Image (cartoon, rainbow, N blue to C red):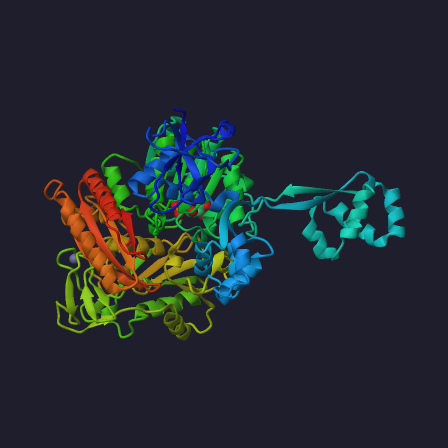
């Protein structure tokens, strides 16, 4: 039997199927091509993920068409996709879909046409008004489905399906080839137009044309829209100028760059200090060795990590290889992008989440063709189609946003290591506050440790003071912070006020002693459910019922939370003349808003910046000398075993904003728990002690990195339906557990998620935990399979989150 194509589909829960390759397509179909194939009664686009002998006893259908001239991926890339598919338990077609920008220029259209029977039904009385309208619209010719829904009032997919069942219409799928390559007309002058004599003649005879020509002579390679903006409608003139040989009009591909509006001046590498030199040397020799070499680059804020990324990238480039730089959220890191652009100019692709599909397609194409050798972007950039990666940088490797919260739930930081192994590249995980996982990988000698213990410029680390907010009259802004804000403003320096707010779940805090309620089984904060006043653990499902007194001192527990607006009002009372700005997701929309605000800060047009998590990220502002932290405890109480780690990271990051210039920085941390170890370690700016302490805790409680977790999430329309499925799954899981070694796997829950309802869907979760990754993988895979056989009603979603980073 001849070889058949194994085809995967970008459809949830889909499997892959074999298709026969017809003779006329034989030389065109290969690994990595997209093909159009019949599937049930439809047509679908799929990816060829293999060529192999098909199973003997199955009659194969034919591939209808090949859609790509060149393959989208090769064998090496495919091994990466397969790894992800297997590890994160997601169909490979879904991984391929995530890895390739939307459609890559292709779209499948559903087209409806009227049948002979349909034509005669136009006069019949057995159809309703909507159906009649649809049929008459179609009698003039077939229409794409979205067109029908648009033009015929009251038409729905259901009404079209009814017509189809009655054989009055038929559907067909056609392929829509979009051209994403945006082109523009560029206009240049010819030698003839530069001839002074001739120019003099047109000036006299055709003054309007002469003006346009003069403009073109001054601005060579003018884009058409630019001319149009200056001269209005000018196509007649241009046509004349072209026909008479004065100008040439050429249609060229436009290179679009979402960061083009940013003002960037070219920058040269700086002379590295001793510590930096040592780090760079290690990374360089690792990348020269062409073997997989992972590093943890632990450098305090402002220690010059970025400079190392830049110089390492240059080195890799010089060796003819490629560099991928991952950043947590690109819109929050305009400065890093700016510095890469300043160093590498147009050699770099910025893969921004706000760029549109065609821009993304552009970058993808250029990287794939090897025309662009550096890319910087957020987590999905891990899929940039490089073929010769010399280095992968993951900046702020501890950041949660590397984890994709929707399916497929991959973690780009972890995938960077997988990719590095496949391409034999250096992988640099950089952070001022390394994640517990990465630090533990260093202890296990899986990654090498590089350290930058000092700031690169002469500035020192800021002084951190803790204020016990329980002892203060005003819980929003304490007396010491008030005074510091006033002093700082008076001396002409800038202040950042950081509001630690995690908007999702409610926790109850004791105003008197600062305690929160904790689950005795799981050592995580219990969540307060506003709807019925109950207090629950959403790891193990413990339900404490209604509870409102502090266990320690008996005082009433209160819901704790302060908004940026409230803080702004109070600040205005302290320093009425200060120019304040707020930075949070409600205030700052899109990349422009952020860049504007950032520029204002740099130009010293803002005195006090008030913001949430956004202000903590990578700004390098020399004028900021005071950072105030309003509610350090909020993130400490999030119901998550990583609450301590997150708080530690946040406080360190935000403190790092202070005193980057010549003046010393000062940080004031307001807290209900001044004696908490995390707060103390953060104030002492001692990462390694924090990490060692945290590892002890995790080990004692059996949390990652000493165990692995899988969080199964259930969503459905009603609470009882959702809890029902969660409980059924629990029962199926318990049965499956009997086939596994005793105590190798632990099942926790089910329990409602802290955010119990999103978009009218109820949410529950079930947590699986094990210290044996292999057994856990086997178990989860088995459970997934068992659930596929248990037929649940439509509208129910079950998703498997491997290595969950949040438990919302
Ligand atoms: P990080 O990425 O660790 O926060 P950066 O690379 O942004 O640190 O460096 C912080 C500041 O120090 C930047 O303004 C940078 O230009 C400067 N810097 C970095 N390396 C050096 C050096 N070797 N000498 C002088 N200044 C440096
Ligand atoms: Zn619990």
Q: In this view of the protein, can residue 626 be seen by the observer?
A: yes
Left or right, 98 with reference to 554: right
Residue at 42% over, 72% down = 575
Q: In this view of the protein, can residue 637 be seen by the observer?
A: no
Left or right, 295 with reference to 524: right
Q: Looking at the image, which is closer to me, 308 or 381?
A: 381
Quadrant position of residue 624: bottom left
Residue lying at the far top of the rendered structure: 1
Q: In which quadrant is the C terminus drawn?
A: bottom left
Residue at 54% over, 43% down = 362
Q: Looking at the image, which is closer to me, 6 or 381?
A: 6
Q: Looking at the image, which is closer to me, 85 or 17?
A: 17
Left or right, 496 with reference to 530: right
Point out residue 607 in the picture as x, y percentages from the top left corner: 45, 65
How many marks do you count on the picture?
Answer: 0
Taking the image as four quarters, which one is ligand 1 found in?
top left
Residue lying at the far left of the rendered structure: 742
**Residue 66 higher or lower than 789, as above or below:** above
Quadrant position of residue 389: top left
**Residue 490 higher or lower than 429, as above or below:** below
Point out residue 771 in the picture as x, y percentages from the top left corner: 17, 42
**Residue 522 higher or lower than 62, as above or below:** below
Point out residue 190 in the picture as x, y percentages from the top left corner: 78, 40
Q: In which quadrant is the N terminus drawn?
A: top left
**Residue 734 higher or lower than 316, as above or below:** below
Point out residue 741 in the picture as x, y percentages from the top left corner: 11, 40
């Amino acid at each position: 039997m001849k070889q058949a194509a194994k085809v995967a589909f970008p459809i949830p829960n889909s499997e892959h199927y074999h298709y026969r390759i017809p003779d006329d397509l034989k030389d065109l179909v290969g690994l990595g091509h997209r093909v159009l194939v019949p599937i049930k009664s439809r047509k679908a686009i799929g990816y060829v993920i293999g060529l192999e002998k098909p199973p003997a006893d199955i009659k194969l259908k034919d591939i209808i068409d090949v859609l790509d001239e060149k393959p989208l991926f090769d064998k090496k890339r495919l091994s990466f996709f397969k790894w992800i598919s297997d590890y994160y338990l997601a169909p490979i077609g879904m991984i391929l879909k995530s890895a390739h920008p939307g459609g890559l220029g292709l779209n499948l259209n559903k087209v409806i046409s009227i049948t002979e029977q349909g034509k005669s039904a136009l006069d019949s009385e057995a159809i309703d008004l909507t159906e009649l309208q649809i049929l008459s619209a179609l009698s003039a010719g077939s229409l794409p489905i979205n067109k029908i829904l648009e033009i015929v009032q009251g038409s729905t997919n259901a009404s079209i399906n009814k017509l189809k069942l009655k054989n009055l219409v038929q559907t067909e799928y056609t392929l829509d080839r979009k051209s994403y390559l945006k082109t523009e007309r560029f206009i240049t002058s010819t030698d003839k137009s530069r001839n002074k004599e001739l120019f003099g003649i047109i000036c006299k005879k055709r003054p309007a044309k002469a003006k346009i020509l003069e403009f073109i002579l001054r601005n060579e390679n003018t884009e058409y829209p630019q001319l149009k903006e200056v001269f209005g409608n000018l196509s007649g003139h241009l046509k004349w100028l072209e026909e008479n040989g004065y100008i040439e009009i050429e249609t060229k591909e436009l290179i679009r760059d979402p960061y083009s509006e940013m003002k960037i001046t070219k920058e040269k590498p700086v002379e590295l200090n001793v510590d930096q030199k040592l780090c760079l040397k290690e990374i360089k020799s690792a990348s020269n060795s062409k073997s997989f070499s992972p590093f943890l680059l632990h450098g305090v804020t402002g220690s010059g990590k970025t400079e190392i990324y830049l110089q390492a990238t240059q080195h890799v480039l010089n060796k003819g290889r490629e560099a991928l730089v991952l950043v947590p959220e690109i819109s929050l890191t305009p400065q890093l992008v700016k510095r890469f652009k300043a160093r590498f100019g147009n050699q770099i692709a910025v893969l921004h989440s706000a760029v549109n599909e065609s821009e993304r397609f552009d970058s993808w194409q250029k990287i794939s063709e090897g025309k662009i050798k550096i890319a910087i972007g957020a987590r999905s950039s891990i899929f940039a189609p490089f073929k010769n990666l010399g280095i992968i940088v993951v900046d702020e490797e501890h950041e949660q946003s590397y984890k994709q919260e929707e399916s497929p739930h991959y973690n780009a930081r972890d995938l960077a290591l997988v990719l590095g192994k496949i391409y034999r590249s250096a992988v640099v995980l950089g952070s001022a506050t390394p994640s517990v996982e990465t630090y533990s990988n260093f202890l296990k000698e899986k990654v090498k440790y590089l350290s930058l213990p000092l700031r690169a410029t002469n500035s020192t680390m800021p002084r951190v003071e803790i204020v016990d907010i329980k002892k203060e009259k005003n819980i929003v802004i304490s007396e010491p912070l008030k005074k510091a804000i006033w002093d700082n403003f008076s001396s002409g320096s800038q202040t950042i006020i950081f509001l630690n707010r995690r908007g999702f779940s409610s926790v109850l805090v004791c105003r008197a002693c600062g305690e929160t309620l904790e689950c005795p089984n799981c050592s995580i904060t219990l969540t307060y459910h506003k709807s019925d006043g109950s207090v629950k653990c959403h790891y193990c499902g413990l339900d404490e019922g209604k509870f409102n007194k502090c266990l320690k001192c008996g005082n009433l527990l209160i819901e704790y939370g302060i908004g940026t607006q409230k803080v702004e009002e109070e600040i205005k009372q302290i320093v009425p003349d200060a120019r304040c700005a707020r930075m949070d997701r409600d205030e700052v929309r899109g990349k422009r808003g952020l860049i504007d605000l950032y520029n204002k800060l740099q130009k010293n047009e803002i005195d006090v910046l008030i913001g949430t998590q956004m202000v903590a990220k990578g700004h390098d502002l020399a004028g900021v000398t005071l950072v105030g932290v309003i509610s350090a405890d909020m993130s400490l109480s999030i119901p998550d075993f990583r609450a301590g780690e997150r708080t530690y990271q946040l406080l360190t990051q935000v403190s790092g904003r202070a005193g980057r210039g010549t003046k010393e920085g000062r940080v004031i941390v307001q807290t209900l728990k001044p004696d908490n170890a995390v707060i103390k370690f953060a104030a002492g700016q001692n990462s390694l002690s924090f990490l060692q302490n945290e590892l002890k805790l995790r080990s004692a409680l059996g949390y990652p990195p000493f165990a692995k977790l899988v969080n199964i999430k259930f969503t459905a329309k009603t609470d009882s339906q959702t809890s029902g499925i969660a409980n059924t799954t629990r029962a199926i899981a318990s049965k499956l557990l009997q086939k596994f070694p005793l105590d190798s796997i632990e099942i926790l829950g089910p329990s409602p998620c802290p955010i119990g309802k999103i978009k009218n869907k109820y949410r529950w979760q079930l947590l699986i935990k094990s210290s044996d990754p292999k057994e856990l993988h086997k178990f989860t895979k088995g459970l997934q399979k068992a659930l596929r056989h248990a037929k649940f009603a439509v509208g129910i979603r079950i998703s498997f989150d491997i290595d969950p980073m949040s438990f919302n």
